[in-house]
Image (cartoon, grey):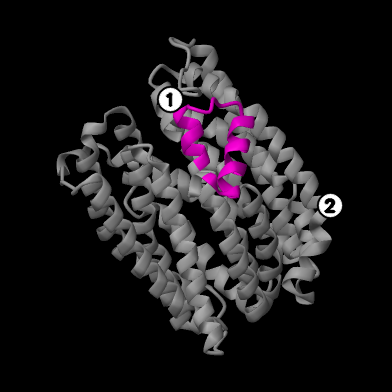
């Protein structure tokens, strides 16, 4: 039984040490996400090591360059309808079928159009050493197919059934591990072979994800009148997510263009480890996201009070992780291979990122929950432009070190800006009601 597994007990201990009661919905959903993300972490660690060791920094850097470029455009697939589904269903469960149907339709239409555009852009801008067929396969997978997996996860999140979201993520990781295992068994560990497996496994997972939502939550319905009225708000959500992706991932694409694929592989491996370390906080944020919308109905003061209840222990965890990354960094080449020796230094430079990300995500979700997504998006877009400008200056001179310095500066600027915006709004709108979601 999963409820008696070591992973589940570990996840429950962490959730309770974030200050939640054992019976609260937030604890239950955080435990689901932590359990799923922990299992996903183990699986992804295996296939990450297999990919990095078998492809080497050059080919791994090429793969990451394409996925990073695709990630910038992917948030515009669906025009934010997935986040709108979470927002509105969290407040009124009866509208789920309509938002589920609209999200599927918008994902299909916009995803198909954006796939063509981003594939053409990647072929024109990325290094010619990356095979065109690899670019096309990866873009189809990430811009179109994987969005349906994401949409299925959002559907479960909107009704606070995060067990479905978590285990769908686990299934996706496990399936991709199976894909790379088949490649290794066939003794064809090439970038092209992995790209084919990447697309095939994505299609399988998308079908399973949509099927699970249909089975557990019901059939979709179209409510086209809602789409037109929410286009602007949806665009804000999409723009914010894209800007977030830019200051997280554009450095990898720019490294491939302005530096080298080897440097991209070194830096991407370090950044991947940062993402892994941030999983518990990401799980907490996913579980708490509907609560930000419910508390945000009463104004920014209420959503900030909700964030402040969650932030201290999350911040303490991130500080401990930063120290752990600094200490454990020399172990990376022993796991990934001697080719990744420079990843040790890269990881040490990036070790502060979990702290900065924790700080800005709670402020950002407080703004979103209180109806200030437009302001959040504006700040994120400005920081994304800052990140691109600094990368253009630093990467040609300092390679991956310049990318690391740019990431630290961008995340620090984002955290300071978002909290300043939230504090300013708080002074103009006192709380009307104290939040109740932390222990609900």
Q: Nearer the viewer, mark 1 or mark 2?
A: 2
Residue at 33% across / 39% down in the picture?
A: 84
Residue at the far bottom: name it.
187
Q: Earlier in the sequence, mark 1 or mark 2?
A: 2
Residue 428 visible somewhere in the drawing = yes
Q: Is 189 above or below relative to 321?
A: below
Foreground residue among 22 and 266:
22
Dominant secondary structure of the magenta stretch? Answer: helix
- Residue that numbered label 2 is attached to: 327
- Left or right: 344 with respect to 310? right
Would you name the residue on which mark 1 appears? 370
Does the magenta run of residues contain 17?
A: yes
Q: In this figure, what is the number of numbered marks?
A: 2
Q: CA distance from mark 1 to mark 2?
A: 39 Å
Relative to 428, is 178 above or below?
below
Image location of residue 335, percent across then percent down: 74, 69
Q: Which residues are drawn in magenta?
A: 4-31
Q: Where residue 194 appears, x then y in whole percent?
A: 50, 79
- Relative to 371, is 287 above or below? below
């Amino acid at each position: 039984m999963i409820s008696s597994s070591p992973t589940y007990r570990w996840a429950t201990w962490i959730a309770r040490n974030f200050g939640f009661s054992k019976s609260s919905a937030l604890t239950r959903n955080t435990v689901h996400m932590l359990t799923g993300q922990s299992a996903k972490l183990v699986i992804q660690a295996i296939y990450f090591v297999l990919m990095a060791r078998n492809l080497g920094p050059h080919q791994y850097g090429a793969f990451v360059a394409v996925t990073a470029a695709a990630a910038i455009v992917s948030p515009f697939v669906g025009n934010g309808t997935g986040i709108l589904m979470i927002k509105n269903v969290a407040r009124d469960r009866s509208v789920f079928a309509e938002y589920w149907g609209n999200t599927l339709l918008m994902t299909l239409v916009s995803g198909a159009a954006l796939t063509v555009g981003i594939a053409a852009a990647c072929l024109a801008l990325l290094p010619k050493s990356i095979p065109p067929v690899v670019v096309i396969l990866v873009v189809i997978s990430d811009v179109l197919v994987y969005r349906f997996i994401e949409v299925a996860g959002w559907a479960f999140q909107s009704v606070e059934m995060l067990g479905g979201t978590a285990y769908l993520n686990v299934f996706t990781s496990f399936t991709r591990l199976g894909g790379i295992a088949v490649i290794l068994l066939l003794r064809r560990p090439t970038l092209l072979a992995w790209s084919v497996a990447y697309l095939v496994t994505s299609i399988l997972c998308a079908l399973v994800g949509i099927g699970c939502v249909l089975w557990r939550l019901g059939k979709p319905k179209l409510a086209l009148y809602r789409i037109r009225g929410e286009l602007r708000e949806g665009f804000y959500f999409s723009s914010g997510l894209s800007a977030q992706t830019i200051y997280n991932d554009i450095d990898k694409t720019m490294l491939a263009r302005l530096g080298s694929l080897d440097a991209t592989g070194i830096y991407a491996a370090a950044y991947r480890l940062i993402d892994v370390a941030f999983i518990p906080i990401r799980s907490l944020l996913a579980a708490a996201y509907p609560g930000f919308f419910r508390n945000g109905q009463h104004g920014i003061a209420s959503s900030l009070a909700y964030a402040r209840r969650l932030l201290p222990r999350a911040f303490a965890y991130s500080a401990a992780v930063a120290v752990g990354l600094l200490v454990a960094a020399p172990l990376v080449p022993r796991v990934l291979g001697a080719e990744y020796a420079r990843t040790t230094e890269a990881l040490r430079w990036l070790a502060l990122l979990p702290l900065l990300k924790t700080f800005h995500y709670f402020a950002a979700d407080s703004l979103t929950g209180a109806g200030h997504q437009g302001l959040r998006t504006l700040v994120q877009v400005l920081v994304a432009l800052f990140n691109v400008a600094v990368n253009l200056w630093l990467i040609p001179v300092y390679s991956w070190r310049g990318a690391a310095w740019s990431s630290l500066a961008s995340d620090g600027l984002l955290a300071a800006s978002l909290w300043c915006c939230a504090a300013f709004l708080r002074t103009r709108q006192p709380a009307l009601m104290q939040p109740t979601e932390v222990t609900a």
